[in-house]
Image (cartoon, grey):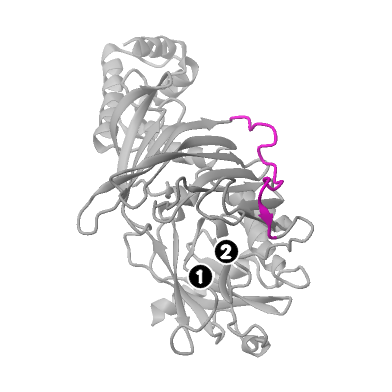
Amino acid sequence: MKSVNNLHKLFKKLHVPTSATLDEQINSEILTISNEMKSNRLAISRSNFWKAIIKNKMTKPAAAAVIIAATLIGLRWFGTGAPAYGITEALELWKNAETVHIKGWSFLHTGDDTQLAKFPFEIWFDRRNGCFKHWRPHSGAGIYTSETPRYCLAVSDGEYIMETSGEIGSNENSNPPLVIFTKLSPFEQRLQIRTMSPFPAYMANLDQVKGFTQVGREQIKNKTVDIWQGVITSGVPRFIKKKIWVSPETGEIVRIFTWINAGENSIRWVALSDADTIEYDAVPPANCFNTDPPAGHKQINTKKTVIERELADGSADAKFHSCIGFTLKDGTVIYGWHANNKPEESQAHLFTDLEPGGPLPNLPAKVVGLRPYPAQESIILAGRHLTFTRKKGKFYEWGIYASDEKTPERNTFAGYEIISKYNFGPRPFFDGRPGSLGQDHELAINSEEEFDIWVRGAMAELSDDGNAPESITYENVMQLAGKIRNTFNEQ
């Protein structure tokens, strides 16, 4: 092979002993690893590729020279057809993208899902500036009841979010479509940048690609791309099937087609969406993130009258709701939530004499546990009290959640199912309840610095004095988590 000849020349310059036998052994090892990658349909990183070569006793003496050679020659496939990027690497690249533009089609129907019509959608995503724009047809379960579906628009300029209930010309609602503003606090602005995903949750989660296989290769827009396909069976109401087109050279995802299972007792796939145009590092058009209300819309509020949003996963008026969660390196979760079905009554007495690591406060409702989903293991992280904060008369419980079992790595599951307990009989009137924790309001914390910025920052955000409790430090929490796990083992 030409690549081996080049390596042979370079080895001589580096004074590495070479021979036809060694050339053949190196070539054979690379080809073996490549074939294993193909047969197992696994994504493998470049670093793991080299580790596999180095572990081989025959190729180890020349491994350093091979690495240098690869760098100088600029090889991506080493002549074997092994892709530089698989589906896993492509999704990591996707998550870290700064700017992404997506266009495509949503498939809807008027009651018969065998008769689908397609309607356009468009997404702009600018992580650097914390901006986004989502324009899509709105429907319930893929159904629209008017001549054309009602369109929804959500735009953020980084400080304000403008959302509409329907675009001009909608026949589904005779009333003028509505527009509402949300103002983000400085902490929420930083959080939006940190948690933004170029492909929003309503387009179905892309994190769950375990078991996806490479099913083909084709040309798209002058690019040779690999086609990956699989079924997401957990963490969604119904099975989702996806076909994802990935450039093995750049790692860019260039197309995503999604189906949903519409069968009750059997599998019956119905097209859901086709994101047929995906562009990385695209330049947004002028005024792309303009939050001025569209003409013909009725404003519920204005930028001058809007109240800054409270840190919450939904309406701040809900009497039982999530605030934010954090997963630490050891799998421990810190989770802030609020529960008060009688907001006119103070809860101060319920937060006295609480101890870190002790029982949760005796609130009308409690988040007693978190369950990772989807996860192979049946794991529940049990809740204990960590601390509390108070802002404008509302009390926020910050629980610490841990398990006596080893929790899966955070990047292997989508989020947490929230396990609630109501203390006064059947579920009382709360105007909402937390159902899951993930994506927009849950962060992975990997260092003491991140702990100070995000965990203590969130507690300060929900405190009247703008400060987090002094005792809540990275070291103290990690020690407490260890003690809690020890108590599980003693039981």
Secondary structure under badge 1? Answer: loop
State the residue at coordinates (66%, 40%).
Answer: 128
Q: Quadrant of residue 188?
A: bottom right
- How far apart are labels 2 and 1 at the CA level? 8 Å
Is 283 rendered above or below residue 366? above
Magenta stretch, main secondary structure class = loop
Note whether residue 445 is visible: no
Please state if 242 lies on the left or on the right of 428 as rendered.
left
Number of residues whose C-alpha sits closer than 10 Å to that of mark 2, classed few (under 14), some (14–19) or many (20 or more): some
Q: Residue furthest left?
A: 266
Task: Give the image location of residue 153, x and y in percent.
Answer: 58, 47
State the residue at coordinates (37%, 31%).
Answer: 54
Task: Give the image location of residue 257, x and y in percent.
Answer: 37, 38
Where are the magenta residues, as a range?
Answer: 282-300
Please state if 210 lies on the left or on the right of 328 as rendered.
left
Which of the labelled discs sits on residue 434, or is there none? 1
Question: Is residue 296 a member of the stretch shown in magenta?
Answer: yes
Q: Amino acid at mark 2?
A: Asp
User: Disc 2 designates what residue?
Assistant: 313
Please state if 430 lies on the left or on the right of 48 as rendered.
right
